[in-house]
Image (cartoon, helix red, strand yellow):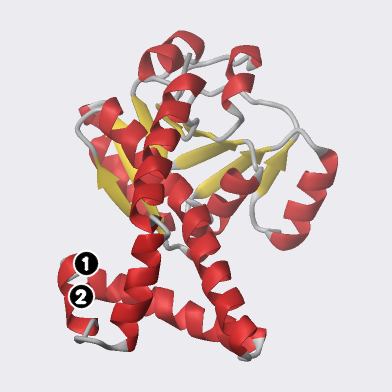
Amino acid sequence: MKLLLIGAGNMGGAMIPGLRGYDLTVVEGRVERREELAKRYPDITLRGDLPSLDGYIVILAIKPQSLENLKTRGEAEALISILAGTPLKKLRKQIAAKAYIRAMPNIAALKAKSVTSVTGDGSFKVQALEILSAIGKAIWLENEKQLDIATGLGGSAPAWLALVAEALADGAVNLGLPRSVSYEYLSGLMEGMGALLADEHPALLKDRVMSPGGTTAAGYLALEKGAVRDAFIEAMEAAYRRSKALGK
């Protein structure tokens, strides 16, 4: 399959390592960014201009507000858009393709560990999941509303988890643990919890760790007093509202 990645910013660039197994062409308008990518990935094709879309599976990774100014020619074999909040009907009006897919990866694509939400034309479901599995785990969703909700969970939550990690490290440093040691713990902690959550409900994991009158219970009480659960629920709602607004 021939892939054409349009846009190599933070998210588009994070997808490149996993997609290098394909015949990959990357379109990036900024000269300095192309030079940076050429040094890092000498095996990929880089262009500053947009070729005809004929024969390509296009992965669109530009800013949502730039879509209306994108001038294309030809018809793509399929379009996979990672534009937050941009509905399929808008993509169909703007870009010619035989099939349309919306996807929302996250920055962990850099390590082939993204959890990517996917929806769109069922005729291209198998191929879309295959391509996006190259950057991590791809999850097919039934409709665009589910994808807009999952944008917060899959796309934005890595930043929220980074905030949690930083706060926990700050707490440990405040008590006297070196910062480098704190981050080493947190890296292993996040990886271990991911493996555990694949097999067990989070509430059961919490109950297993929290013994009566212990350290975990004391810390959990402090988190409840800080309304941490409520803050994360509100963060999900805010991300969903923003995703919908970006599509208008």
Q: Is residue 21 visible?
A: no
Residue at the extreme right: 32
CB-based contact (under 8 Å), mark 2 and mark 1: yes
- Residue at image point 44% right, 36% down: 239
In this view, the residue in front, 247 or 40, is 247
Q: Which mark is residue 202?
A: 1
Quadrant of the image for the N terminus?
Answer: top left
Amino acid at circle 1: Pro
- Residue underneath mark 2: 205
From the viewer's perspective, tell me whether residue 56 is left or right of residue 183.
left
From the viewer's perspective, tell me whether residue 245 is left or right of residue 100.
right
Q: Secondary structure at mark 1?
A: helix
Measuring from the top left, give residue 102's x and y in whole percent.
Answer: 38, 31
Residue 90 sits in quarter: top left
- Residue at image point 26% right, 33% down: 146
Is 182 drawn above or below residue 3 in the view shown?
below
Measuring from the top left, give residue 226's x and y in whole percent.
Answer: 42, 59
